[in-house]
Image (spheres, rainbow, N blue to C red):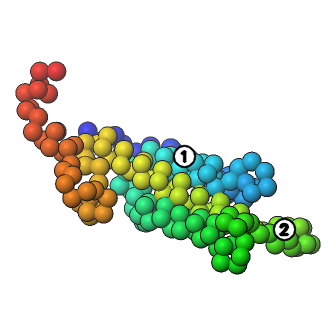
Amino acid sequence: MKPHPSYIFQSAVRVLFFLINLFALYLMLRGHNVPGGGFIGGLVTAISLVLLRLAFGLDQTRHMLRVDSVRVAAFGLTIAALTAAAPVLFGDSFFQHHMVHLHHVPILDDLHIGTPLSFDFGVYLVVVGITSKIIFVLGRSTHGEAAFEPQERVLYSAPAERPIEPKARQTEPKEAHDAD
């Protein structure tokens, strides 16, 4: 029996999703000058994904996100790696960061933008991608489904691997459930 959705909880999660991700953006943007950054911002965004999963279910959450989590993580890793390696092309050391200081910007006053921000953004995407993949894999397995969908199995599993979840539940005799 599938539980009925809570419309109050779903409405609250829609508002909380926005607020939580706004806070995650704040944490990421302040991270290259004070504590915070891409890692903690990514974890906060992952919390908002867990809330989405609880409110709307696994399938609807996957449909809302519309992008493969592993691709998000790979894109973030590429950004972080390029940010770290780019200074080498200009004769600087690996991970050498550079800052641009803009003074008297309207509304924002003094603005300091640097390569640590792009590195933090890459880390943010890696954390969001990996944690959302974990959420989806664990969510599928708690519902008795295979960890990966058929098209994902080709991408993320070794050729010799065989799924164990569906077989274990399908071959279990019906009498075992009746005895409990």
Amino acid type of the residue tagged 2 in the rendering: Leu
| Apparent side of residue 82 relative to residue 168 in the rendered image (left or right) | right
Q: Is residue 137 visible?
A: yes
Residue 172 falls in which quadrant of the image? Answer: top left
- Residue 9: x and y in percent read 50, 44
Amino acid type of the residue tagged 1 in the rendering: Ile
Q: Tell me what residue is drawn at x 92 percent, y 72 percent.
A: 104
Q: Residue furthest bottom?
A: 90
| Quadrant (top left/top right/bottom left/bottom right) for the N terminus | top left
- Residue 69: x and y in percent read 44, 60
Where residue 47 is drawn, which disc sits there?
A: 1
The crowd level at tag 1 (other Cα within 10 Å; few <14, some 14-19, many 20+) is some
- Residue 22: x and y in percent read 66, 56
Q: CA distance from mark 1 to mark 2?
A: 29 Å
> For this rendering, which residue is in front, 23 or 93?
93
| Apparent side of residue 134 relative to residue 9 in the rendered image (left or right) | left
- Residue 61: x and y in percent read 42, 55
Where residue 111 is drawn, which disc sits there?
A: 2
